[in-house]
Amino acid sequence: MSSTTTDTPGTGGSSGADENVPAGEKATRATLKYVDDHFGSAGFLKRSMDKVFPDHWSFMLGEIALYSFVILLLTGVYLTLFFHASQHEVIYNGSYAPLRGVPMTDAYASTLHISFDVRGGLLMRQIHHWAALIFTTSIVVHMFRVFFTGAFRKPRTINWHIGVILMILAILEGFAGYSLPDDLLSGTGLRIAYSVAESIPVVGTYVCYFLFGGNYPGQDIIPRLFIIHVLLVPGILLALIGAHMMILWHQKHTDFPGPGKTENNVIGSKFYPTFFLKTNGFLFMVFGVIAALGAFATINPVWLYGPYSPGQVSAGSQPDWYILFLEGSLRMMPNWETHIFHHTISWNILIPGVIIPGLMFNLMALYPNIEAWATKDKGYHNLLDRPRDVPVRTALGVMSLTFYMILVIGGANDILATTFHWSLQAVTWVLRVLLIVAPPIAFKLTKRFCLGLQHHDEALLHHGVETGIIRRLPHGEYIEIEAELPPEKAEVLAKQIGYVGHSNGHAAITAGTNGHGSNGHATNGNGSGPKGGRLKRPVGLAETARARMEHFLTEEREPVPDAHAADHADEETPVH
């Protein structure tokens, strides 16, 4: 941001210079001076323009979510002008000939009108739908990055909680959005949602009656979903995204360990002009990709499904991907019911539709607090972990992802059975078994894979890179020559592993280097790591549980054998 100077009154030193300043620049200076005089914003703007953002591709995932949300707002405003949120029955007489004369709700008729009669309506519908999918996808992938790199740790725990709420609201917003057209596919999803809500003991029937305005399908659900979709949830999303961005802007940006990077600095590009130009270019790239998808990739062709009828269900019907895990859990659950005091509890709907999603989202939200409590981690973290350096956390993430993906596959069990000519019951039973067996296997394999990568990194730092050159020693032994890593690469690798120094390919690890210990956790406020300090015998049930969880979460690095030391030992051992 360029600074301006003002001369002392009466000197008239700047009169000649001001005459050469273009009119546009004069107006800009005057506007900025007016704003600064009233709000004192010059200092804030200067600090903001100088804010540094690290250069790493993974930080662009959050930007994709932000820009997709902007596209959702713009296209949503356009679609709102033509959509009729009404379940009043009409006779369709529009441009789509196969449905002329068919009775349908006004909501479905207006959706057909937008698709075939409004100029650019179908393009806007498809851009809106693709933007919704990319918005949800980018939030989920962004949270994967935050989890696996430990970016949720103090002082960013609140931002993690905001992110979890944003993900839940994005799923709710997407479900409300694709339910509005009132076609046969979306109506089937609403019927499932009604059953899930109705399965909640005691309050379920009251909740359904309130939302739907009576017995299913009622006459009020589409207007109420419309208000939720265009007013309530977007307003909350906008507020939470604003809070998320303000917290991000106030705190230092996280970065991966590397040369010159510490917990107290950020190395990268300033916001203006470098990052400002890059992020605006990325905005247009995201918009271009979504516009191309909307123009060339058909999505949600509601005219092929027909209007919703409670007595019909579309064959091979699947919701959008972010609801597919809920669909899969409902399909895979056995038919369990309990009758208590003349009341039926449908466990086949309550467990997969309410309890499992509730546990998933609550565990996701509370994990940062659980890890910090178990490891006594009270330190501030601006440097990120590599997933391999925290094997247990990484294994837990992969295990959870495996569980989730099996549920997603279960949502398409009928498609799998039809495509590959398998038995539907056999597919369902195989997925039920995998849901129990596969996550622990994924945990064990991921943990061992991370430990193997740690071993490989330390071997590189200790012994260097294999050159492929074979040398024969005087006593007949063949060895491969190893070349030390270049100093720059060795320094980066040492920082990533958590070593403070290295000499001749050897390094010494410390528990507090850049906030990283041998198990990937930082030192606490007292300067001792999770396993450091005086050993105390656990007292009480809570402390015993915490100690056991700490033992589970922390994983010491496996020592790397020093081949050179072994060679020296062999040389010094006399041969008889």
Image (cartoon, rainbow, N blue to C red):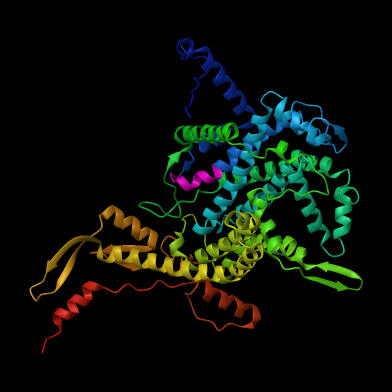
Q: Point out residue 239 in the picture as x, y percentages from the top left corner.
A: 69, 43
Image point (68%, 64%), residue name: 332
Left/right of residue 5 with respect to residue 508 in the rendered view = right
Q: Point out residue 533 in the picture as x, y percentages from the top left corner.
A: 48, 76
Residue lying furthest bottom: 576
Q: Point out residue 58 in the picture as x, y percentages from the top left corner.
A: 48, 48
Q: Point out residue 440 in the picture as x, y percentages from the top left corner.
A: 55, 71
Left/right of residue 251 with respect to residue 70 in the rendered view = left
Residues in magenta? 54-63
Residue lying furthest left: 474
Q: Nearer the viewer, residue 569 or 302?
A: 302
Residue 527 seen in the figure = no
* 166 shown above or below 460: above
Image point (25%, 54%), residue name: 486
Quarter of the picture containing the C terminus is: bottom left
Examine the image and state in which quarter residue 205 appears.
bottom right
Q: Nearer the viewer, residue 425 or 396?
A: 425
Examine the image and state in which quarter residue 340 appears.
bottom right
The magenta stretch spans residue 455: no
Residue 318 seen in the figure = yes
Q: Which SS type dominates the magenta stretch?
A: helix
Q: Nearer the viewer, residue 287 or 282?
A: 287
* 554 shown above or below 385: below
The magenta stretch spans residue 57: yes
Marks counted in the figure total: 0
Image point (41%, 46%), residue name: 267
Image point (34%, 65%), residue name: 456
